[in-house]
Image (cartoon, rainbow, N blue to C red):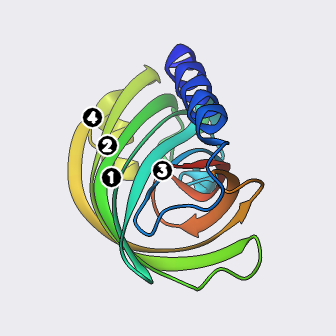
Amino acid sequence: MKNALLLSFFSLLFAQTTAAQHGRAPERYLDVNAGIGILPTYLKDAGRALTPPLSLSADYKLAKNFSLGAFAGFSITETGLRALRDGGTAKWRNSTSLLGLRFAARSRPMGPWEIYGGMSLAYAHANIEIMEGQLEKVKNENGLQENSGRMIYAGFFGSRYRLTPRLGVFGELGFGISLASVGLSVRI
């Protein structure tokens, strides 16, 4: 996974340097974003992130103030040893993947800043692995399933700061692989 993140980073950097000669961005463009979660979705579980929430998205500008995109995310979180109601203990690992579409409304650029927000529809898949304890007790007490997937609808709000006409940084809030993410953005 680290290799994929590094490959993505260097691909984005290469795209930035090759496109640096073009002054303004074209009327229609694609924003490719690679981010890392700073506030995991499973925050209430007080788990330890083995793989921090990683996200990759691509948003195509459809019209002056609207874009349509796709996104994916991945995270692995492990709980500490938890006391159960019956006196037993358990520890588990949650591997979560997310894949979906998103629609955003964008503000007009305010200097190097751009604000956006919208709705997303995604399929979320969680795989729970019991590290210690009895699976049935953990299932009954916490309502966890070993392998589950579901559709989620969510909103998001973010801003992007352009460092150059093609390269920027972004911050985003919303339900997904992370409640808050930051990262790099390349405009193609």
| Residue 80 visible from this viewpoint | no
Q: Quadrant of residue 78?
A: top right
Q: CA distance from mark 2 to mark 4?
A: 8 Å
The x and y percentages for residue 76 are 50, 31
Q: Quadrant of residue 11?
A: top right
Q: Name the foreground residue: 45 vs 109.
A: 109
Is label 2 in a helix, a strand or a loop? Answer: helix
* Residue where numbered disc 3 is placed: 177
Q: What residue is at 48 percent from the left and 50 percent from the top?
A: 177
The x and y percentages for residue 109 are 65, 80
Q: Nearer the viewer, mark 4 or mark 3?
A: 3
- Tell me which amino acid carries mark 4: Glu
Q: Name the foreground residue: 101 vs 50.
A: 101
The label number, if any, that marks residue 146 in the structure image: 4
Q: Is residue 148 left or right of residue 96?
A: left
Crowdedness near tag 3: few (<14), some (14–19) or many (≥20) residues, C-alpha within 10 Å: many
Q: What residue is at 28 percent from the left and 35 percent from the top?
A: 136
The label number, if any, that marks residue 139 in the structure image: 2
* Residue where numbered disc 1 is placed: 143
Closer to the chain start, of discs 3 and 2, is 2
Q: Name the foreground residue: 180 vs 6.
A: 6
Closer to the chain start, of discs 2 and 4, is 2
The x and y percentages for residue 80 are 64, 32
